[in-house]
Image (tube, grey):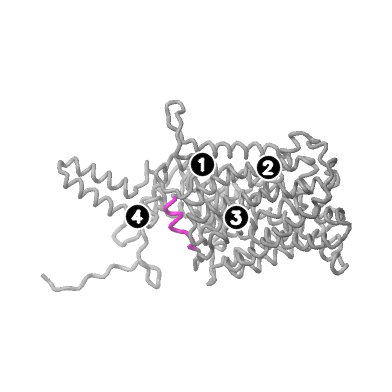
């Protein structure tokens, strides 16, 4: 069942009476219907987001958030776990991402809003689960910005050393506790640089990201061409030195490298044609990224013994230097990596701000995150998130960050797969611009017709859970602690300040849509005994349902449509029509 908002009765002075109290369980599971989510798209405090992104820009945002993370930074963390079989780890992570990407594409085309999986969960699974999902996304995005920024200093040093012969001291260029590192200054600087781009506006940031994505694709193809000459067959043996467990562990670590399509879905309220363009951008970007990841990983482990990857944060630059014996190629790749990692930071930071924007609009986090300036930019949101991520990047080691991001990503993706199944059951007739493959094919299961396409969300959920279980105990302990903190914040703040809680929500068996209202009206009138009465009843019900659906209230807003406000914010009374007295 979906939550159906019912307008409270109005008294003589046109003031709404307080909403009826709901049970504790009902308040936890209240859902924000799809129609209201879509109707509120782009609306912030004091302004609105601007729709300026096309399909190509959305694809570049997705690639920008994905390509570069797993190759330029985390490859040195994953190869010691899997050996040359890290290629399989990339495929495993990519296939897991594919099933979830199909679910994301379907929901992004159906619910094109900024909240990504948080908003999808709010419409299908209930408020408390949506909060948990949003809290995971904060971990996923905020921490992944920091994790990627950590490796930026390594490639920046390679570039500075090869060009001007000067490097940043280890105490200021390395993660704390790694090779004498105390405070990672370059990581903080790259986050602040990306913050400056985001403040300029979504369209301007997308343009800069497109340029950076082009540069890093060229850099990776150049690496493959040069490093291919250094491949030695002996480097591929033993292919799986640590067994299937090592492959799974590496795949779980690398999975956070595939969050790019999730970043694309956060641009739903700034896309020109989100229902059509978002699904295409998600699937196209995942295909391009997976092919490049597997290609680069296969060449890298063939050109350098897998044991030498241990502790290497700039592995590709080192391979280029060893293969050619010249520093020029390493410097060129380092320059590409500097731009590539900056692109990841820019797009993932963008996604984090838009998720908090959606949560703030729903009342679950402070209003400051939903305030929009005249450029259509959530300024305070961008500054706060950037400073937090920058300090985190400068003070926390990379490995812990990457694993924490992976578990948050996997949990959020698992919920998205569940959300697809729930929405198929509760709203089967809803228009979907994209559906997972074979959705139109039905099979008989225990006397019930089940869409074959639901196999993909089920597999996506199962693979996400499997990869979560591959992570170590410390990561689970950090994740559990993060969840406890999030629940404390929800019960202390979000549960009472939620927009649905303030407006009041009543639970009914089905949403009063135009079709349902017309059918009910026709049935009632038909009992009166005339076809004319049935037709009139249908028209009356249609007129009653349509405005509410357009306003989002027929889908669970919990509030009556607002009257036109005067300057003082009070409802403006309807003026009496002038005319001759009868």
For disc 2, the neighbor class at 10 Å (few under 14, some 14 to 19, many from 20) is some
Magenta stretch mostly in which secondary structure?
Answer: helix
- N-terminal of the two: label 3 or label 2? 2
Magenta extent: 34-43
C-alpha separation, residue under disc 4 versus residue under disc 3 = 32 Å
Between the residue at mark 4 and the residue at mark 2, the CA separation in whole angstroms equals 47 Å
Mark 1 and mark 2 lie on one chain; the one further toward the N terminus is: 2
Q: Residues within 10 Å of mark 1 (few under 14, many from 20)?
A: few
Residue 379 picture location, percent across and down? 59, 67
Image coordinates of residue 307 in percent, x first then y, are: 85, 43
Disc marking residue 91: 2
Label 4 sits on residue = 548
The image quarter in which residue 64 lies = bottom right
Whether residue 81 is visible: no
**Alpha-carbon span between mark 1 and mark 3:** 22 Å
Camera-nearest residue between 474 and 54: 54
| Mark pair 4, 1: CA separation | 33 Å
Q: Is residue 501 left or right of residue 528?
A: right
> Which badge, 1 or 3, is on the more N-terminal residue?
3
């Amino acid at each position: 069942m979906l939550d159906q908002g019912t307008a409270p009765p109005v008294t003589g002075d046109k003031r709404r009476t307080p909403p009826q109290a709901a049970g504790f369980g009902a308040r936890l599971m209240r859902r924000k219907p799809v129609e209201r989510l879509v109707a509120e798209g782009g609306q912030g405090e004091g302004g609105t987001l601007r729709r300026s992104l096309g399909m190509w820009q959305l694809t570049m945002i997705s690639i920008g958030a994905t390509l570069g993370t797993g190759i330029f930074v985390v490859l040195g963390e994953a190869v010691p776990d899997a050996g040359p079989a890290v290629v399989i780890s990339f495929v495993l992570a990519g296939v897991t991402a594919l099933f979830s990407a199909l679910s994301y594409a379907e929901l992004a085309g159906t619910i094109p809003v900024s909240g990504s999986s948080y908003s999808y969960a709010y419409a299908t699974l209930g408020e408390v689960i949506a909060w948990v999902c949003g809290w995971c996304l904060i971990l996923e995005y905020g921490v992944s910005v920091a994790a990627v920024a950590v490796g930026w200093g390594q490639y920046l040093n390679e570039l500075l050393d090869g060009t001007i012969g000067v490097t940043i001291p280890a105490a200021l260029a390395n993660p704390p506790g790694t090779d004498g590192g105390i405070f990672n200054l370059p990581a903080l600087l790259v986050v602040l640089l990306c913050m400056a781009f985001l403040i300029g506006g979504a369209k301007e940031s997308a343009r800069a990201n497109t340029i950076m994505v082009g540069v890093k694709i060229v850099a990776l193809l150049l690496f493959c061409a040069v490093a291919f000459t250094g491949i030695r067959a002996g480097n591929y043996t033993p292919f799986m030195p640590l067994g299937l467990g090592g492959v799974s562990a590496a795949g779980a670590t690398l999975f956070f490298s595939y969050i790019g399509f999730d970043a694309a879905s956060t641009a739903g309220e700034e896309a020109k044609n989100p229902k059509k363009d978002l699904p295409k951008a998600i699937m196209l970007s995942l295909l391009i990224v997976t092919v490049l990841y597997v290609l680069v990983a296969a060449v890298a482990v063939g050109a350098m013994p897998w044991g030498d990857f241990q502790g290497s944060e700039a592995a590709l630059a080192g391979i280029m230097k060893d293969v050619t014996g010249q520093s020029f190629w390493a410097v060129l790749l380092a320059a590409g990596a500097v731009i590539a990692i900056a692109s990841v930071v820019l797009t993932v930071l963008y996604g984090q701000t838009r998720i908090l924007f959606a949560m703030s609009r729903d009342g679950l986090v402070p209003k400051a995150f939903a305030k929009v300036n005249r450029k259509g930019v959530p300024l305070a949101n961008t500054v706060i998130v950037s400073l937090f991520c920058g300090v985190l990047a400068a003070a926390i080691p990379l490995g812990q960050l990457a694993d924490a991001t992976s578990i948050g990503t996997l949990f959020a993706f698992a919920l998205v797969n569940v959300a697809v199944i729930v929405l198929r059951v509760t709203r089967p007739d809803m228009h979907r611009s994209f559906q997972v493959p074979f959705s139109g094919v039905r099979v008989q299961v225990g006397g019930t017709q089940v869409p074959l396409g639901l196999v993909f969300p089920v597999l996506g959920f199962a693979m996400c859970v499997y990869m979560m279980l591959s992570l170590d105990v410390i990561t689970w302990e950090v994740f559990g602690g993060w969840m406890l903190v999030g629940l404390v914040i929800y019960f202390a703040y979000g549960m009472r300040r939620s927009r649905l809680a303030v407006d009041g929500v009543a639970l009914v068996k089905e949403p009063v849509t135009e079709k349902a209202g017309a059918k009910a009206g026709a049935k009632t009138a038909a009992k009166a005994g005339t076809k004319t009465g049935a037709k009139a009843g249908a028209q009356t019900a249609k007129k009653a349902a349509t405005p509410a659906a357009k306003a989002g209230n027929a889908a669970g807003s919990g509030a009556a449509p607002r009257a036109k406000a005067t300057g003082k914010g009070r409802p403006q009374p309807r003026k009496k029509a002038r005319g001759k007295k009868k």
